[in-house]
Amino acid sequence: MIAVTAATGHLGHLVVDSLVERGVAPERIVAAVRTPAKAADLAERGVVVREADYSRPETLATALAGVDVLLLVSGSEVGQRVQQHANVVEAARAAGVRHLVYTSAPQATTSALVLAPEHKATEELVAASGLPATILRNGWYTENYLGAVEQARETGVVLGSVGEGLVASASRKDYAEAAAVVLAAAEADPAFEGGVHELSGDVAWDHPYLAATVGEIVGREVVYQDVTPEVHAQILLDAGLDEGTAGFVVALDGNTRDGLLAATSGELSRLLGRPTTPLAEGLRAAVGVASAA
Ligand SMILES: NC(=O)c1ccc[n+]([C@@H]2O[C@H](COP(=O)([O-])OP(=O)(O)OC[C@H]3O[C@@H](n4cnc5c(N)ncnc54)[C@H](OP(=O)(O)O)[C@@H]3O)[C@@H](O)[C@H]2O)c1
């Protein structure tokens, strides 16, 4: 069986969809989720829904019984994730999971990306567990810019402090399909070779290009306005963000300026067997999904 954690989240749900599309029988897929009530649609489709809370190890042992291949989608509770992921890896080892797949971050073990330390620690504990594993170092989601679209619709401006930094984003669906490719291959082949994959979009774009693309979507002229990190932080504080969140956003823009999200390895399109979804297409789909929700 193949288990996918966080299958009530955007990425995990798309992975389950993709596994089914690839012909994996729903009853061979376990949606291992913190909130089973949110997974009613998956249960209706015949997917096995089990409770799996990263912070409650007792749920993990039951959730992973009989599972051969596990996708651990990185948690969303920043600061708690290393212990949470350790709980899942330990439960996987105890349950006899044959192959673990983990969604990490670009160059996690060496990057200065603010989000990298928890992914680095997780990669290290996966390695220390001795479990055969595949690390999917997911790059930036195109969907992260949905907020920028909505803001630009109102103001005509995409504002940031990324300078000339490039972003090689891809759609969540691209990353999800790649995960499904790996999971299905690992399930089919007991000797499946793991490894580390640096996944990102085929094209690294800059923020003036983002602004022009957003402009086409919202039907007005949109420009990119670059400000200093200090001014950026003050604008975010004035807009009501708390200091921690504002600092985090500005730090991420600094990481972008430093090129930490720019690498185009081509590994994602190679796994998919097709080009990654272009920025405009990915943003349009995300806007469509958001307005239909
Ligand atoms: N590469 C990027 O650009 C990028 C951007 C954002 C996030 N990420 C990372 O990628 C992950 C997946 O992204 P996403 O878009 O699918 O995020 P998402 O839609 O916010 O979903 C997060 C999922 O994590 C689950 N979760 C949180 N805490 C948990 C816990 N203690 N035990 C079990 N499940 C827990 C949530 O369960 P509930 O439904 O019960 O809340 C939800 O299913 C994120 O969690 C984050 O680590 C990457």
Image (cartoon, rainbow, N blue to C red):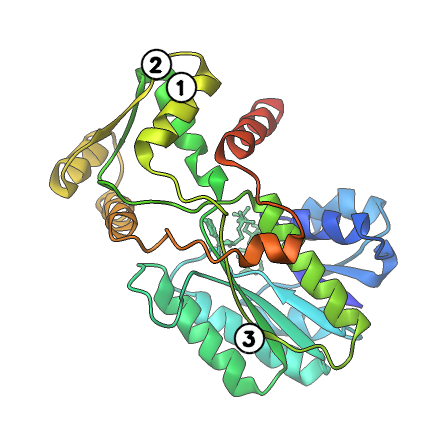
User: Residue 118 location in percent, x, y?
Assistant: 40, 68
Residue that badge 1 annotates: 215
Residue that badge 3 annotates: 87
Amino acid type of disc 1? Gly
Determine which quarter of the picture holds residue 228: top left
Q: Nearer the viewer, residue 23 or 125?
A: 23
- Give the number of callouts: 3
Q: Is residue 188 left or right of residue 170?
A: right
Determine which quarter of the picture holds residue 253: top left
Residue 39 visible in this rendered orientation of the protein: yes
User: Residue 6 location in percent, x, y?
Assistant: 61, 56
Labelled disc at residue 221: 2
Query: Image point 72% across, 68% down: which residue?
Result: 63
Query: Image point 45% across, 18% down: which residue?
Result: 216
Q: Nearer the viewer, mark 3 or mark 2?
A: 2
* Residue extending furthest toward the top: 220
Amino acid type of disc 2? Glu
Task: From this view, report whether residue 241 is shown above or below residue 135.
Answer: above
Earlier along the polypeptide chain: callout 1 or callout 2?
1
User: Residue 30 location in percent, x, y?
Assistant: 76, 61
Earlier along the polypeptide chain: callout 1 or callout 3?
3
Q: Residues within 10 Å of mark 3 (few under 14, many from 20)?
A: some
> Could you say whether the residue bearing mark 1 is in a helix, strand or loop?
helix
Determine which quarter of the picture holds residue 210: top left
Amino acid type of disc 3? Asn
Q: In the picture, which quadrant includes the C terminus?
A: top right
